[in-house]
Image (cartoon, rainbow, N blue to C red):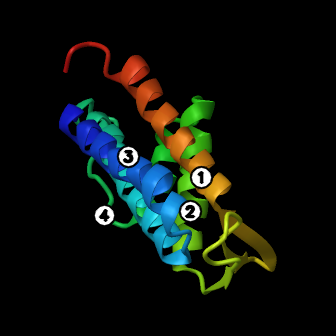
Amino acid sequence: MRDLLNNAKEELKRVDHLIYVSLKYTRTVDVLKNVIQRLLGSFDFIAESLLKQALDEKKITAIPIAPKLRAEELEKLYSGDSEIIEAVRLFVLVRRISQSEYEKENEYRRHVAMVVKIDGEEIKVSIDKVTEYYKTTRHLIEYIEAKYFNNGQ
């Protein structure tokens, strides 16, 4: 389970580089898409580590394969933990963003954005927005390690 969290951290290292190096110089929507895909990879590792722990503790009988089912299972298992619930909701939003049709805005400029419509609402995914998602994910890993994996597993 720690290995899965370490994999999530490795994905975040790649996200860090994409945000603070690649986006700084290229400022393209393709890099924003790549950041989102890496964040999803990190979320997947985090979810799997939490679900594996729940499986070992016999709180669940099987780990769902589909990301939507994993999110629902995590919401049930950690219904009292607002940090994890908020992270799951962010994961669902980022996943929907990645699967949506998008338009490019201000490409090659500081305010480059990927514009998507979800449920009729326009969402602009900018450098600042993906940086916020990155920081939230990094905080989540630290939180999970401290709260759920501090017993030396």
Q: Earlier in the sequence, mark 1 or mark 3?
A: 3
- Marks 2 and 4 sit apart, C-alpha to C-alpha, by 18 Å
Query: Mark 1: which secondary structure?
Result: helix
Q: Is residue 140 left or right of residue 1?
A: right
Q: Earlier in the sequence, mark 2 or mark 4?
A: 4
Residue in front for this viewpoint, 36 or 25: 25
Quadrant position of residue 93: bottom right
* Amino acid of disc 4: Ile
Q: Is residue 146 above or below residue 89?
A: above
Q: Which residue is mark 2?
A: 94
Query: Mark 3: which secondary structure?
Result: helix
Q: Quadrant of the N terminus?
A: top left
* Amino acid of disc 1: Leu
Looking at the rendered image, the disc whose residue lies closer to the viewer, 3 or 4, is 3
Label 3 environment density (alpha carbons within 10 Å; few <14, some 14–19, many ≥20): many
Q: Are marks 1 and 2 in contact (CB under 8 Å)?
A: yes
Q: Which mark is residue 90?
A: 1
Q: Is residue 3 above or below residue 23?
A: above
- Marks 1 and 2 sit apart, C-alpha to C-alpha, by 6 Å
Q: Residue at x 43, y 19 (%)?
A: 147
Q: Quadrant of the C terminus?
A: top left
- Residue 14 placed where, x, y %? 34, 52
